[in-house]
Each structure stands twice: as C-alpha cells, then as structure tokens.
C-alpha cells in the first residue's frame, strides 16, 4: 500500500467516528449516516492527493454535509412542525439516557436544513460564516435558521443557566 | 452550564452503540473510480477528438460532486450523484445521440463554437434501464449541425415519474481545446411552470421549455452566469402556473 494510502487509512480511522456521528445527528438514521460517511470518505479518497496536505477533515466534512443535502432532493422525509417539543418531565433520573432521548426527539422535529445548521454550528463549532459557506447560503439565513432551530429546541442562545433534555428549569 | 452548552453536550454524547466501521476496501475502490472519471471529464484521458462527446448520466436529482457510481451501462453512470461521475458514452450510438427526439431548444447562450441547444435523444437499453426511453443532450449547434457535448438521463426507475430528473451540469465539459460551460440543467416530469432555487441566499429562476414530444416533460436550465456551479444551488422547487408548489 502506498504511503499516501496509509495516511488515508489513518485519517479514516481517526475521523470516521465523529463524522458518522455528525451524519447521524443530521439524518437521524444510523444506516443512512454510515452510508453517508462511506460516500464522503470515497470522495475524499478521490481527492486525497490534493487535500491530504491541507485540511482533509474539513474537506470530508463538507463533502458529507453536501451529500446529505443532496439527499433532500430525493423524496423528502421531513418533520417540520410549528409546534415546539414538549419537555420531558422533571422526574427523569438517568440523565444521559434522557438527554439522548430528548435530543433524538428534538432533532427529529427540526427540518433537514435546521438540523444541518445546528450540527455544523454547535457540534462542529463552526462560525456562522463557515456554516453559510458550507451550505451555500447567506450568513443571514444561517442566523435565522439557527435561531428558529434553537427556539424549537427551547434553547436560549444566551448565558442563562437553564436545563435542556429532561431535568427542567 | 447554560442551555447552549447543554445542547452541545447532548450533541457530543456518544451513541448508545458504536457505528459500523467504514469499509476501507470499498471506499478506496469507489474513490479510485471517482478519480478516474474526473480525469476523463477534464480531458486528461481524452483522445484528440475535434468535438468532444462526453455523455453523462446522473441518477435521480442531485447536484453536488459525486459519490458512488454504478458500472456504466449505457450512456452510463452513477447511481447517485455528481458532476464528477462522468464517463464517455460508449454504448449509445453516436447517431442516437445526435438525433433529436422532438424539437431542439435554443438556450440563448453562444460560445466560440456556436449556440448551445438542448434536446431529447433516444435511449434503448431494456436490460440496464428498462424504464428509461430518453435522455437530455446539451449540444453545440453551428453551420455543420449538432455536436453533442453532454448528456444526462435518469438511470433508476421511470424517466417520466413525477418530479425532477437528470439534474446535473454546472461544469466544464469537453477537451482542452473544445470546452463548453454546461449550465445546470435537467427536466421535470409534471406540470411545472416555474422552477426556482437560490444561490447564496438569492433566488434564481430556471428557464423552461416544454418538450414537443410530451408537454408534461419540462426541460429547464439555469443561466450559467447566475449559477456557475451546481454546488451553489439549494434544493430546486417547482411550481404550477397557478403558483402551487409541486415539490417539497
């Protein structure tokens, strides 16, 4: 195996967990997420000679998100709703489990674009400008989409100390 | 910890079960295929044809650089996406590709070689694509006639099922000596009277032409100045003449 291939294997092993996780957060489907990651890595390998000395991770992330966005052009499975999700009751004990369940349900109520913005902005910690660049939309669209998504998630974008995911305020 | 930090914490929570490990063998095989086809597209592997004939087929309705391909059947190509997945057509006879089915539509775009036109061409691949009888061809028309440049067609299911088909383009096709900027193009099966998208937040409308052979099929293309690449577009939307949205 060529040296560059060795480097690619190392890259995939290092990056696959987080990228697949991101795909899962955006799609809400394990198999779809694994397929999307697989495709993103194949495209990254196709461009490996060009990106291996640059930011291969950013390249793979962009390809991944764009691939999922492409999927929106197929028959869509959207969960858009005007209603904000109910908070789980305050009696939950296993916080991690509750938090995960809350997150799955809450992300499921966002539109595909809102999920993508939330994941890029708050999972990958990209700036609004970088999110706009990756999605090919304006910064204003990112701001409004993010704001709308957080409202649906009932997350304040401020310093207030409040809880999400099951423990109540 | 505020709500936003808790959201980030929840997003970073490890999944209950680890994800399947990537299949590296398949990834590298798919990646190699994509790379090879990109080289063909850019002309690196092209022979010295005076007029390049690059036939491209895209599955379904996708625009961005491309993922997995299928072994090319006809005018052949990827089951899913992408401009990168272009291959020279070998199976479809040249005469089929240069023979329009129905009217030839001028795109109102000229380059050094002539004017760009769009037309449907016959596909007859009952084994590989039983539901596909036609594809779209972008060609250059000059005094010598039509010179096919870039083809796109449905590869899965029916070519006239409701919705967008063969959406592709937004790239340069041809050889180094004869290059054509291929607009983002495709067709919609259904009563579309307006097709729109956005580029960097700005709305853009496609130009439309009904196919003379079937008025329920509407060819569309975007101005390459407004839409220089397919990757810049957000999902397409189609509307009826009355303004009813046909797609999500």
Image (cartoon, coloured by chain):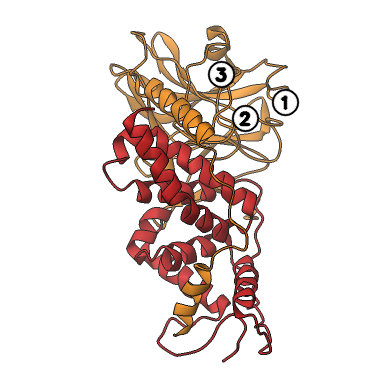
- Percent across and percent down for residue B58 are 55, 31
Quarter of the image where the C terminus of chain B is located: bottom right
Q: Colour of chain A?
A: red
Q: A58 or A131, which is in the foreground?
A: A58
Q: Colour of chain B?
A: orange
The residue lying at 55 percent from left, 61 percent from top is: A25
Mark 2 — residue?
A: B154
- Distance of label 2 from label 3 (alpha carbons): 10 Å
The residue lying at 50 percent from left, 30 percent from top is: B30
- Percent across and percent down for residue B45 are 36, 15
Q: Which mark is residue A90?
A: none
Q: Which mark is residue B75?
A: 3
Callout 3 secondary element: loop
Quarter of the image where the N terminus of chain B is located: bottom left
Label 1 or label 2, whichever comes before in sequence order: 1
- Distance of label 1 from label 3 (alpha carbons): 14 Å
Query: Is residue B211 in view?
Result: yes
Q: Does B6 sit left or right of B173 as displayed?
A: right
- Distance of label 1 from label 2 (alpha carbons): 9 Å
Marked residue chain, label 1: B
């Amino acid at each position: 195996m060529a040296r560059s291939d060795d480097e690619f294997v190392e890259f995939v092993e290092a990056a696959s967990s987080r990228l697949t996780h991101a795909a899962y957060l955006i799609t809400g489907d394990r198999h779809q997420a694994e397929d999307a990651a697989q495709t993103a890595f194949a495209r990254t390998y196709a461009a490996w000679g060009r990106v291996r000395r640059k930011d291969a991770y950013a390249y793979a992330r962009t390809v991944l998100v764009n691939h999922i966005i492409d999927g929106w052009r197929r028959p869509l499975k959207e969960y858009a709703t005007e209603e904000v999700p109910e908070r789980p009751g305050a009696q939950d004990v296993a916080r991690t489990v509750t938090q995960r369940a809350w997150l799955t349900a809450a992300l499921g109520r966002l539109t595909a674009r809102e999920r993508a913005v939330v994941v890029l902005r708050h999972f990958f910690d990209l700036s609004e400008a970088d999110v706009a660049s990756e999605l090919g939309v304006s910064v204003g669209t990112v701001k409004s989409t993010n704001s709308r998504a957080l409202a649906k998630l009932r997350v304040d974008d401020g310093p207030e100390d409040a809880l999400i995911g099951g423990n109540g305020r | 910890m505020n709500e936003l930090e808790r959201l980030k914490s929840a997003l970073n929570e490890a999944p209950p079960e680890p994800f399947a490990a990537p299949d590296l063998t398949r990834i590298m095989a798919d990646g190699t295929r994509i790379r090879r086809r990109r080289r063909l597209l850019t002309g690196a592997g092209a022979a010295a044809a005076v007029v390049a004939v690059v036939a491209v087929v895209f599955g379904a309705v996708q625009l961005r650089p491309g993922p997995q391909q299928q072994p090319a059947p006809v005018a052949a190509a990827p089951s899913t996406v992408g401009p990168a997945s272009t291959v020279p057509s070998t199976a479809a006879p040249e005469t089929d590709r240069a023979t329009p089915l129905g009217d030839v539509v001028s795109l109102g775009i000229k380059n050094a070689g002539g004017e760009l036109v769009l037309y449907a061409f016959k596909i007859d691949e009952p084994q590989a694509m039983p539901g596909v009888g036609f594809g779209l061809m972008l060609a250059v028309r000059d005094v010598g006639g039509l010179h096919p440049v870039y083809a796109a067609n449905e590869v899965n299911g029916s070519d006239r099922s409701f919705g967008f088909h063969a959406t592709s383009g937004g790239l340069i096709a041809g050889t180094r000596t004869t290059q054509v900027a291929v607009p983002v193009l495709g067709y919609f099966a259904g009563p579309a009277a307006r097709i729109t998208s956005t580029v960097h937040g700005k709305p853009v409308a496609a130009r439309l032409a009904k196919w003379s052979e079937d008025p329920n099929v509407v060819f569309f293309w975007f101005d390459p100045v407004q839409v220089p690449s397919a990757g810049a577009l957000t999902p397409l939307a189609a509307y009826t003449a009355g303004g009813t949205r046909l797609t999500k």
